[in-house]
Amino acid sequence: MATLAAPAPGLLLGYAADLVVADPLRAHPVAGFGQAAARLEGALYADSRRRGTLFVAVCLGVVSGSSWLLVRTVNTGAPGATGRPASGRPNARGLAALTAVATWTVVGGESLARVATRLRRHLADGDIDGARALLPSLCGRDPNALDASGLARAAVESVAENTSDAVVAPLVWAGLAGVPGLLTYRAINTLDAMVGHRSPRYERFGWAAARLDDLANYVPARLTAALAVLLAPLVGGSRAAALRVLRRDGARHPSPNAGRCEAAFAGALGVTLGGSNVYGGRAETRGPQGAGPDPSAADIARAVRLSRAVGLAALLLVVTVRAGGRRPGAPR
């Protein structure tokens, strides 16, 4: 069971790599998975939950099975001529290196922060068109009809939600199930982004992907919200106010998870989120979250600072729990 959870050195190194290098602009492994899943969708698609469930099961089966095999091979060595592992000793360094690469591949906090910061600079310079051009890199809503305030709100909401999806959730699943947890979680999140949204094509086919993503993010989203409340003073906010908004407004959102993150960020930043959003011509109205003014460009910078603080706190929490839960004499 030594490979069940990710080694702390690998998590720390992979997280640091994301801060320095961020995501690769080309040939990202997640993009490769998305392309393969899209081809499989073309072969399996039918307007039914059963076909959608089969699609998700095949995709996750391949990712989970191959990642477990990879971890086993790295950790114990390739089987020898007798069929047994070449070495009986766990390969701690190899497993740490594999964890670092997987963590860097899956965690996307720095890319999120950099895109949000660029959008903020466009708004600060009065370049609305430039901000609109960047918004699709943060979220799927239609930017064309958004003014500066709407763009700022979209950016803050995206930073809040993706702090959980792109940072906290991968770390939680790495702590629970190591590299397979990391990669399988990212596959779940990618499938939800591909087919989990409500549209005539994916209303039934995407049902399994959307529900599984909700389940995978249930605990991480609430951890993200709790950490945002705890760290509210770092961005000039109040823990009491953030907790009050989280309790009151966390459920005013179509998503059972994103609403908690956005409400906690709204309370910590002292702004109001929610309202009407347009996705591919389809309008969606969300209840108000918070009791302050609409977000501004300056609030995007504060949201990014809070997001980074929450991500670092989640990393330290997972590493601490891993260190405390390791059996005496067990490999690190």
Image (spheres, rainbow, N blue to C red):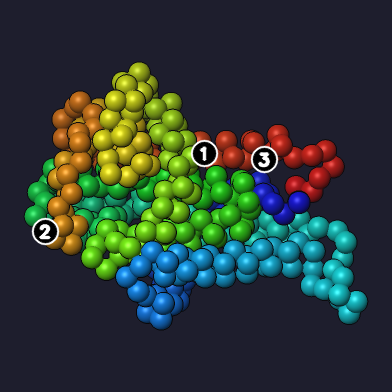
Amino acid type at image mark 2: Asn
Residue at 19% from the left image edge and 57% from the top image edge:
279
Q: Which residue is mark 3?
A: 322
Q: Are marks 3 and 1 in contact (CB under 8 Å)?
A: no
User: Which quadrant of the structure image shows residue 69?
Assistant: bottom right
Residue at 20% from the left image edge and 26% from the top image edge:
291
Q: Position of residue 80 (x, y in %)?
A: 86, 76
Q: Is residue 94 left or right of residue 166?
A: right
Amino acid type at image mark 3: Arg
The 10 Å Cα crowd at callout 2, few under 14, some 14 to 19, many 20 or more, is few
Any part of residue 109 in sight: no
Q: Where 6 falls versus 243 (above or below)?
A: below
**Which mark sits nearer the N-terminus, 3 or 1?**
1
* Secondary element type, mark 3: helix
Q: Where 267 falls versus 158 (above or below)?
A: above
Q: Position of residue 44 (x, y in %)?
A: 41, 77
Q: Which of these two is toward me, 275 or 28?
A: 275
Q: Which residue is mark 1?
A: 314
Amino acid type at image mark 1: Ala
Between the C-alphas of marks 1 and 2, the distance is 35 Å
Q: Which of these two is toward me, 110 or 258?
A: 258
Q: Position of residue 225 (x, y in %)?
A: 40, 34
